[in-house]
Amino acid sequence: MMNSVSTLLSDYIQIDTSTSNGNEKKGLLYLQSLAKSYGLYTFYHETTSTKGNLIISIREEDLQPFNDAVYDINNKHQGARFSNPPTVLLSHVDVVDAEEEDWTHHPFLGAIVDGEIWGRGAIDAKQIGISHLLAMKNLKGMSLKQPLIQIITSEEESGSENGLKRLLSDFPFLWDDATVWNEGGGFLIEIESKLFYLVETGQKGNMSFTVQLSPKKSTNPYLPSNEVDLLTFLIIDSLKNLQLPDEELPVSVVEMLTLIANELKIDISSKNYKSILKNIPTKYNRMFSAMLKSTFTLTKISGGRKNTESKGQYKLAFDARPLPGTKTSSLIKLVQETVKNIDPTAVVDWISTNGGYDLGISEEMRIRLEECLKLSGVNACVVPFMTIGSNDGRYFQPFKATVLGYCPMTPDITFDQIIQRVHGVNERISVKDLEFGIDQLTMVLEKTLKVY
């Protein structure tokens, strides 16, 4: 299996589908040809000449709703529906850009070195696409009560307009109560020799805004006022430490901390969940801290006195990650008040305001994931967690879908190691980790899909 699996991912990586390249179609057609060679059925949903979405199924009839969809005269989407809510395996073909000179091995050669497959997308998220496809191949022939479909999308890294958002818009009648297996989880953390596998069951919101500051005029050009420089740093510091009042911890975070406390024999009867943090290794501090509150991060500063284009103005760009349930209006009001208290003339401009979601995981599903790990010789506790990033899973929320980010790797690699490779230099995955994920996904689906 090693050579075939590693070669499949290597070949996939060699197709440059980076966001600046913009040609995701080549990668999708590669997966389509593989799927057909395995006796699977495919539907290509074209959104532009170089982008689209690929749908793969193990039964021909599960693609019928896509083929039957029509538009009525009012531009309302009509078409056949699935007889039961589907199970969806979701990944994306596009990857972020990579600079060749920064890498040990070329990011788009898919080099296989010492049992590792190197290249952009080796983790995010081409390995997931290959893992899903081979799980589909393994499950072909099962008599399922519900549709099982794999979806590979375009533009996940750049807004999804010509990817999943378009697919859900064109076929909105298929996704109610779906179960979606997505990226974003399956990573391992180790605390006091206990192993915990993370399942993404929620995402923080994703909001962005700018703050523009104008310079104060000086009567002496040789003694310019530095007041705007001071205000800039005061605003950065105030927003970095901003605390929204009465924030409630998301269900996913409470469940995660409760399970960890139980495994470590920590008393949390007082529901002082933050007390667990003293037991968390330092390398995980940032991840845990980010799950406990809404956060604000400066992403760019432009302008200054010597910048002729900005005419001396400063423009600060911020990324806000609110906890799910945070009222957008309250957050905007607090940011406005914080900035205006420092500089009443500052202008705050909101660019995007996307809310997060928080689902948790059923105890039945959590136990089944643990059982599958044990079948592979791994004794670990599976815990939900809330990612501080965002991915396509959020777009399924209007359909009341259950979205679980999970594609596990072996205990040989932990979350802190993986996170450095995602979008980073020298992204790579071991063949052993790739095979482990395929085996686990196959077992999980066998245990959770309903059969006749």
Image (cartoon, helix red, strand yellow):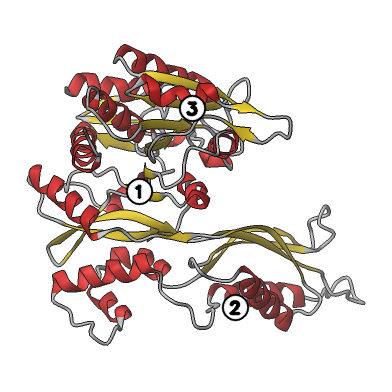
Please state if 211 lies on the left or on the right of 207 as rendered. right
Rounded to the nearest whole Å, what is the CA distance between mark 3 and mark 2? 52 Å
Indicate the position of residue 54 as horizontal and vertical percent values. 47, 25
Indicate the position of residue 138 as horizontal and vertical percent values. 21, 26
Indicate the position of residue 171 as horizontal and vertical percent values. 55, 34
Rounded to the nearest whole Å, what is the CA distance between mark 3 and mark 1? 26 Å
Q: Residues within 10 Å of mark 2 (few under 14, many from 20)?
A: some
Q: Quadrant of residue 275?
A: bottom left
Residue 182 appears in the rendering = no
The label nearer to you, 3 versus 2, is 3
The mark found on residue 289 in the picture is: none
The mark found on residue 65 in the picture is: 3
Residue under label 1: 405
Q: Residues within 10 Å of mark 1 (few under 14, many from 20)?
A: many
Does residue 362 sit above or below 124 in this rendering? below
Residue under label 2: 238
Does residue 413 sit above or below 139 in this rendering? below
Indicate the amino acid at tag 2. Ser
Q: Secondary structure at mark 1?
A: strand
Residue reaching furthest to the bottom: 270
